[in-house]
Image (spheres, rainbow, N blue to C red):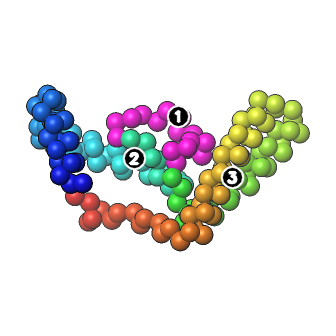
Amino acid sequence: MLRHYRAFLSKRRSVRPSEEYRDPTTEEWEEFHQHFTKRKVELGTCGRGYGTPCAHEHACLRCPLLQPDPAQRRRLDEILANLRERLKEAHERGWLGEVEGLEITIAAAERKLAGMTRQTNLGIPTIPPRRQADQP
């Protein structure tokens, strides 16, 4: 398998422009590391790829790329309770556009909560955040 992979890499590199294989600048490395630092959000980690913008305008709860941290379960429970209270108020006041948006967000939050439960039940450990001393 390794031989095939190395052969694939060699062949691919032979047809790609050589400037793509230069050493990155200090600024490029810093930008790369900052991307992963900025992926840490309230409920976990954003799974979007390097160099890609947030397509969901930071509506993380609705975003399928949010990788929730089971350690944040209590926080998500609080957010969900608040969303349900807001939904109740929106129904009472006839804010139909708000009702629709809240229902979408509640459904997404419930999916995230179910994912956290599955992860916990399967015994998948959470990855502790890197300490400043651990970072390159």
Taking the magenta stretch, the answer to whether it contains residue 8 is no
Q: Where is residue 131 in the image (x, y as percent from the top left)?
A: 33, 65
Crowd rating for badge 3 (residues with CA inside 10 Å; few <14, some 14–19, many 20+)? some
Residue 57's disc is 1
Q: Do the residues labelled 2 and 3 touch (CB within 8 Å)?
A: no
Q: What element carries label 1?
A: loop
| Earlier-in-chain disc, 1 versus 3 | 1
Residue 110's disc is 3
Residue 38's disc is 2
Taking the magenta stretch, the answer to whether it contains residue 54 is yes
Q: What element carries label 3?
A: helix
Classify residue 124 as left or right of residue 1. Answer: right
Residue 112 or residue 72, whichever sits in front: 112
Residue range in magenta is 50-66
Tell me the mark number nearer the camera, choosing from 1 and 3.
3
Amino acid type, label 3? Glu
Amino acid type, label 2? Lys
Residue plotted at (19% across, 35% down): 12
Q: Position of residue 6 (x, y in %)?
A: 17, 48
